[in-house]
Image (spheres, rainbow, N blue to C red):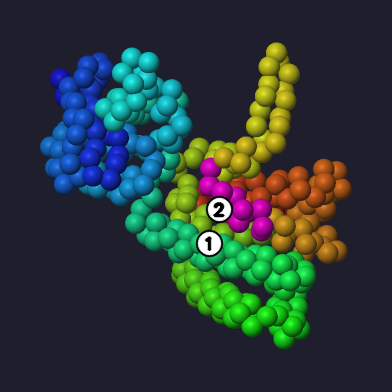
Amino acid sequence: MAIMTIGIDLAKNVFAVHGVDENGKVLLVKPKVARKDLAELIARQPPCLIGMEACTGAHHWARQFRRYEHTVRLIAPKFVTPYRMSGRRGKNDAADAAAICEAVGRPNMRFVPVKEEHQQVILALHRTRQGFVEERTAAYNRLRGLISEFGIVAPQKVACLRRELMEQLETLPGELNRCVGDLLAHADALEARIAEYDRAIADAAKEDARSRRLMKLPGIGPNTASALLASLGAGHDFRNGRQVAAWIGLTPGQYSSGGKTRLGRITKAGDRYLRSLLVMGARAVLSALGDKQDRFSRWARSLVERRGYWKAVVAIAAKNARLAWAVLNYGEDFRLNREAA
């Protein structure tokens, strides 16, 4: 019998491989495979289903194995845990590979879309930019903490903080002046880096026809469009837009029993960064409503009145996630009627 399913426990240098035939009989057990030997081992196997956890390097290996005509599926680690027989064999790499091999063959298993190289390049831009943004915020917070020890409490806005520092600069001790100047210079350098990445992301979004179509949706700009495209690809890994909204974590958790439906808060599952972009875009939509009387604006305004501001924000973000899937999945065949949006 030929190997039909393979589970691989990924690591940095040593991998575990577990393969079974169509009846579940174990035919391949390799608890220690060196990194340099993994590609050769998989290349020797007949085309089969390969499962891996969605962790560091998983997308790279998935692209590599697809070249050998294998079908590759990535699984979120939390969905593999129930299949690990820890009571019998304990927690080790070989047991993890066997659990992955078992989980990938389940008919109702949910998988992580495999990202192509260009998608990961765009996401690398986003991750690097986000790191600089967090570092900038940390620098300003460090400034606030330092000057508060000397009785200076600045407003929240960065412009107000800088103005307050300029006004109080001469009253600060000499060495503190040096600390404040260095932190401000560091923040300025980060601002310049962030602006460069913003331009790079915007240029990439403008060059792609799919991103340009996404930017026609209300509340979706270059950053959100490129992040959605890089994360979803063509959207074919999802059956509908509702799955995308649930994958991003914009749908309510369900606690239903006895025929009674109980919906809680949004799950906040999935990509935190992508969810934050959609939420910020939804907030921008509400702030720009003004006196607009198109159908979408009337719906958003009534939603705020009925459900409150934050629930309206989440509803608009979830709607944009579903529309984004339709744009990517149907391409030119999808036409957004703004009046009916």
Q: Tell me the amino acid under the disc marked 2.
A: Tyr
Does the rendering let one see residue 245? yes
Which residue is disc 2 drawn over?
A: 273
Residue 280 image position (x, y, % from top left): 67, 57
C-alpha span from label 2 to label 1? 9 Å
Mark 2 or mark 1: name the one nearer the start of the chain. 1
Residue 223 image position (x, y, % from top left): 55, 63
Q: Tell me the amino acid under the disc marked 1.
A: Gln
| Image: 7 above or below 340 | above
Q: Quadrant where the N terminus lies? A: top left
Does the rendering let one see residue 188? no
Give the left or right position of residue 303, taking residue 107 as reference: right
Q: Is residue 263 magenta?
A: no
| Image: 243 above or below 256 | below
Q: Are marks 2 and 1 in contact (CB under 8 Å)?
A: yes
Which residue is disc 1 drawn over?
A: 130
Label 2: state its secondary structure.
helix
Magenta-highlighted residues:
270-281
Mainly helix, strand or loop, the magenta region? helix
